[in-house]
Amino acid sequence: MIDADEVERRRRHLTDLCGALPEAHGDTHGSHVKFTVRGRTFAYYLEDHHGDGINALCCKAAPGEQQALVAADPARFTVPAYMGARGWVNLRIDGDDVDWDEVEEMAVASYRMVAPKRLAAGL
């Protein structure tokens, strides 16, 4: 279990990572952060979403990817409440050894799914 300072540090790290994408914005709602590009949501930082007790990057996944990720590593990947039915997936960032390269890769892939082609092509 990570302490409150580490939770905040990881939230800021994810906010910086997603906020660095072209025209991306983060809007804080309580303990969650919604990341958008031109009004379209591409990711969330979720903290204890609906009492699930985890902190995670929640993002869009390509068709079939959600199930594959959860099946391959259910300790790190989970299906989020509500958004899971639309193919979104959680990547936990509350463990001892977060792979920030993987977090960035997933956030960028989700961004590319919703961003205008011109913006996505610039990555």
Image: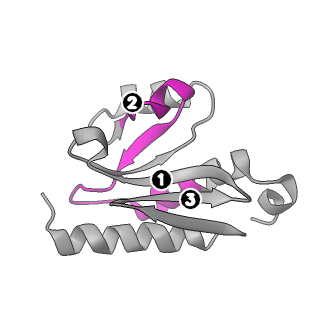
Residue 97: in magenta span: yes
- Stretch in magenta: 78-107
Circle on res. 70: 2
Circle on res. 44: 1
Q: Decide which of tag 2 and tag 3 comes sooner along the chain.
A: 3
Rounded to the nearest angstrom, the CA distance separating label 2 from label 3 is 23 Å
Q: Label 3 sits on what residue type? A: Phe
Q: Decide which of tag 1 and tag 3 comes sooner along the chain.
A: 3
**Which residue is at 46% across, 30% downward?**
84
Relative to 94, residue 91 above or below: above
Rounded to the nearest angstrom, the CA distance separating label 2 from label 1 is 18 Å
**Which residue is at 70% across, 55% downward?**
39
Which residue is disc 3 drawn over?
Answer: 35
Q: Decide which of tag 2 and tag 1 comes sooner along the chain.
A: 1
Quarter where residue 79 is shown: top left
Q: Label 2 sits on what residue type? A: Val
SS type, badge 1: strand
In terms of depth relative to the viewer, which is nearer, 69 or 111? 111
